[in-house]
Image (cartoon, helix red, strand yellow):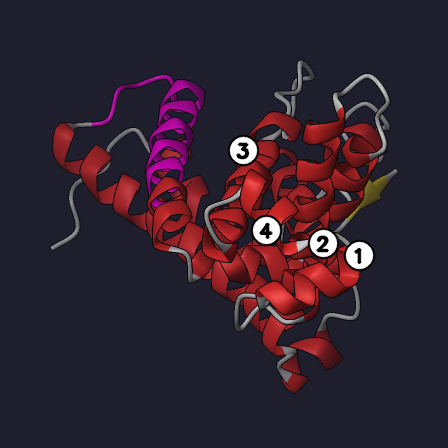
Amino acid sequence: MTEHRRDGPPIEKNTAAAPSPADSRGVGRFEEVLLQKSRDSRLGKRMRTRFLFLTIVAQCIQIDSAKDPTLEDVLERSGLARSTFYTNFKDVAECVTEVLTLFFESLGESRGITERELSSYQAILEANTWYCRSYEANAGLFAGVARNPTVLKMREAQNASWARKIVHVSERRRGVPFTQAIRKEYTGIVGILIVMTTEAARERFVTKDKLLVSTYRTADALAESLTGIWYRMTIGYEQSQTLTRRS
């Protein structure tokens, strides 16, 4: 049986080719991961206390990503003394940066590389589904990354790395090396697509743009629409063996 997608090619109904829950479910709510660590008896008391502060700060950022929580907010939620906080962190800003850094690193660790053979469309759909589900669950933390200079630099470096990897995969699928000019052009296009995806997710899940909310009721719906755009922009580079640089 063949399913015709509005934004992509016809796809055969095949459970081996479809995104599986294990591959595209997203990372879940990161503050819950931190909370579990704060309760892990295998860790020392001081480390559990540190993770408790990190959990509270992550919860505050999820509630209001526009600003850092105050020390008073953190102490009130934790029930711990000011001296205990300063034993673990220089200030709230340092705690915020550690939360966002740990969150950002967890994204790279949780997005595993599938061993299954996927079509170009399915590979893009799987990646976008994972990203949109992760963004929906952690919208405040994603927004916090964008306003933290330290973690933002990490994100920019990772985006550039992903752009190069995507171009490499497309080149492999194509079977013919890109010229240097085409590789540079295509890498820039992929960079634009990454920024577009990030901004679309931010507008949908943080700003809650009315048009996007009404059009894309779920993270999966947004992922499918983004995938259509990605596919139309990238497939030409993969299929054509006579590319010339656009002027």
- Mark linked to residue 79: 1
Q: CA distance from mark 4 to mark 2?
A: 35 Å
- The residue lying at 24 percent from left, 32 percent from top is 242
Percent x, y for residue 172? 40, 18
Disc 1, SS: loop
- Mark linked to residue 56: 2
Q: Are marks 3 and 2 in contact (CB under 8 Å)?
A: no
Q: Are marks 4 and 3 in contact (CB under 8 Å)?
A: no
- The residue lying at 11 percent from left, 55 percent from top is 247
Disc 2, SS: helix
Q: Nearer the viewer, mark 3 or mark 1?
A: 1
- Marked residue nearer the N-terminal end (4 or 2): 2
Q: What's the residue type where badge 4 is placed?
A: Thr
| Part of the protein shown in magenta | 156-178
Q: Nearer the viewer, mark 4 or mark 2?
A: 2
Q: Nearer the viewer, mark 4 or mark 3?
A: 3
Q: What's the residue type where badge 1 is placed?
A: Gly
Residue 167 is inside the magenta segment: yes
Please give the residue where the numbered disc 3 appears in the rendered image: 105
Q: CA distance from mark 1 to mark 2?
A: 11 Å
